[in-house]
Image: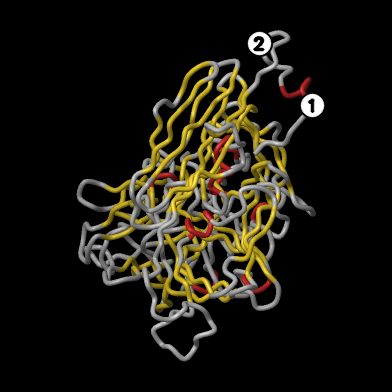
Amino acid sequence: MKRLYFYSVIAAAALSVLFGCSKKTDFLPRLDIAFADGSTLSGSSVNCSEEGGGATIRIACNDAWKIGCDASWITFSATEGSGDAEVILSVGAAEGARSAVVAVYMPAFPQMRRSFDVVQRVNTEPDDPEEPDTPDNPDNPDVPQVREATIAELNASMPASEGSVAADERRDVRFEGVVQNDTRVGNYPSQTLFLADAEASDAGNGLCLVGDTVDPLACGLECGDRVAVTLRAGEAMLVNRGGMRYATGDGEWATVEKQGSGESVARVVATPSRAADYCGMTVTIRAARPTAGGVWCSTTDGLHEFSASGATFDVGVRAAANVFVDRRFDASEGAVTGIVTVRGGRVRIYPRNPADVADFDAEETPDPAHEYGWVASTANLSAGRYYMGGYRNGVLHLAAGGITSAGHGDTVGYESDDDGSISPTGEAAAEVTLEAAAERNGYYIRFGGEGYLTATAAGPGKLELSPDRDRYWIFTDRDGGFDVRQAGDIAVKLVISERATSALLRSVAVDEEGNPVVLFRLGRND
């Protein structure tokens, strides 16, 4: 049976532990980086103007080393080598400010890692302003009282080491981002808003905001909302604490305004050794394995150690996120997706919902022959797992999760026994997941790992499965069931009714013969 699992950097240790697993007996690895003049580079920044620039990096190492950086706008004279070396870092001209993190590490000893920021600032001020650009000149309408910024620029202004600095002493700072929190599930640190640039793939494009003023629930925000944030002059602070970089303040230090919804949330594939550079962003770490299986959380929050690519990180689950409570997981290998934070120099990832850690799910999938219930109105409809189907020539067919070449839904036939149970005549049905959207009775319809149901146009045979959650379906009550229409400019419908008689998943109001569709709910307590 196809299964769907629904709902919703490294701490220092004693040298004997840190290197005890090394295959090189009595070998003590050494790695240091510095500027050409010998000044300290690790934890510092390479600063460049809008015209570009660079630096010469001295690497002192007694084994093989590599340089890791996801920013394509930074080039190196060499990205790997062995022993002591000098590497030239170069940055070209830019029209906007940007920042990235560069890591120098030893492949044989993943714990040996030194990193620094590369910051490129762009002067947006006029060369000879006629009036001083300060809040002391409020009567001049040509003087901006708010400075526009990007998340990358704010990260570039963060302290490179432990400490804090005002976002701007003179003016308010305004920037935009896409909400990463899944507030419907609630698995994230309280009063923390995670924002990232839309479709961001480079490190340094995520930001955490901490405080009751920016609480995503209090602000009425959901995952995928685009917001504009204004940081108040002299009140908002940029903080680096234990590697966790965030904005915070006292009193009304920030305002959050919703600009729109339905933005896609980019997921960046990262390694644990680089994950801290994506703080505030949603990442996926592949080939990860928990130290042990168990339950994600119960009456208290859960914290579980995972490892991948020779490095460790933690997966955090809050007891307030009910869909994780008493949900079991296996010590198997798979992908972990979630929002990146850093606690005490160690990466901690918060899955947005159980689908983000579905590869480890130990929950049993209900058999369609048993625990299910009819859904005949929106009164008993909610986010959860379902089977979707209909009857063709008196035989029940359930959705198999694919789309035929004709643009209709693939189905699987089921037989009904005398006791009322049903069983597949071939391949088992696919679980359909309804994921709640912003509008009342609005849901995304997802078929396992195959994608979200959407329609390219109105009319028969226009269904497709998309990996992006860019459209959703709205359920509206009707006599004997309810209609389903796609949100947006495509007026396509599916009709779902307990009294279905034939066919299913046709991308019209009903199928070509006028027959509606049925919906079974799995696991009444899900």
Which residue is at the front of the view, 506 or 276? 276
Residue at the (35%, 56%) spot, across then down: 453
In the rendered image, which quarter contains the C terminus? bottom right
| Amino acid found under the numbered disc labelled 2 | Lys
Residue 76 percent across, percent down from the top left: 40, 32
Which residue is at the front of the view, 76 or 342? 76
Residue 227 visible in the current orientation: yes
Residue 127 percent across, percent down from the top left: 36, 68
Q: Secondary structure at mark 1?
A: loop
Residue 164 percent across, percent down from the top left: 67, 58
Q: Is residue 38 above or below residue 336?
A: above
Identify residue for label 1.
14
Q: Is residue 232 above or below residue 408?
A: below
Residue with the most extreme bottom position: 139
Identify residue for label 2.
23
| Amino acid found under the numbered disc labelled 1 | Ala
Q: Quadrant location of residue 294?
A: top right
Q: Earlier in the sequence, mark 1 or mark 2?
A: 1
Image side of residue 413 versus residue 383, left or right: left
Q: Quadrant location of residue 295?
A: top right
